[in-house]
Amino acid sequence: MLVVHVHVQVKPECMQAFLDATLANARESLKEPGVARFDVLQQEDDPTRFVLVEVYRSAEAPAAHKATPHYAAWRDAVAPMMAVPRNSVRYRNCFPPDEAW
């Protein structure tokens, strides 16, 4: 398993539009065979900050995800909503075991 945390800060006036677009992308992402999990988290003390927790079944799955129409639509829709460029960090899963996902 490969876990990716995508850190996003959006412009305050774009929070709801960002959330709407991101939830649509998350729902479609969960239909992909390579996606085990796709969580959307909003920071409690700063609601302009989000973390997307993406869990992939293989090292190739993120590239397949980025080739989907729903990802391209999300990327293009949210780009002008960003307060700062988004960044991501990749993690190797240690626990729970991969077969438990």
Image (spheres, rainbow, N blue to C red):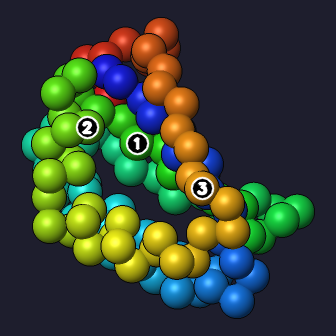
Residue 22: x %, y % from top left: 43, 70
Q: Amino acid at mark 1?
A: Glu
SS at mark 3 in the image: loop
Residue name at image x 17 percent, y 27 percent: 60
Residue name at image x 54 percent, y 31 percent: 89
Residue 81: x %, y % from top left: 57, 77
Mark 2 vs mark 1, foreground winner is 2
Residue name at image x 52 percent, y 39 percent: 88
The quarter of the displayed image where residue 26 is located? bottom left
Asked if the residues shown at circle 1 and circle 3 are in contact, with their CB atoms under 8 angstroms apart, the answer is: no
Name the residue carrying label 2. 62
SS at mark 1 in the image: strand
Asked if the residues shown at circle 2 and circle 3 are in contact, with their CB atoms under 8 angstroms apart, the answer is: no
Name the residue carrying label 3. 85
Q: Which mark is residue 26?
A: none
Taking depth in this image into account, of 27 and 96 the one nearest to the observer is: 27
The quarter of the displayed image where residue 56 is located? top left
Q: Which mark is residue 54?
A: 1
Residue name at image x 88 percent, y 62 percent: 45
| Within-10-Å neighbours for mark 3: few <14, some 14–19, many 20+ | few
Residue 43: x %, y % from top left: 75, 59
Q: Amino acid at mark 2?
A: Pro
| Within-10-Å neighbours for mark 1: few <14, some 14–19, many 20+ | many
Asked if the residues shown at circle 2 and circle 1 are in contact, with their CB atoms under 8 angstroms apart, the answer is: yes
Residue 65 can be seen, yes or no: yes
**Real-space Cα distance between discs 2 and 1?**
9 Å
Residue 27 can be seen, yes or no: no
**Real-space Cα distance between discs 2 and 3?**
19 Å
Residue 91: x %, y % from top left: 49, 21
**Real-space Cα distance between discs 1 and 3?**
18 Å
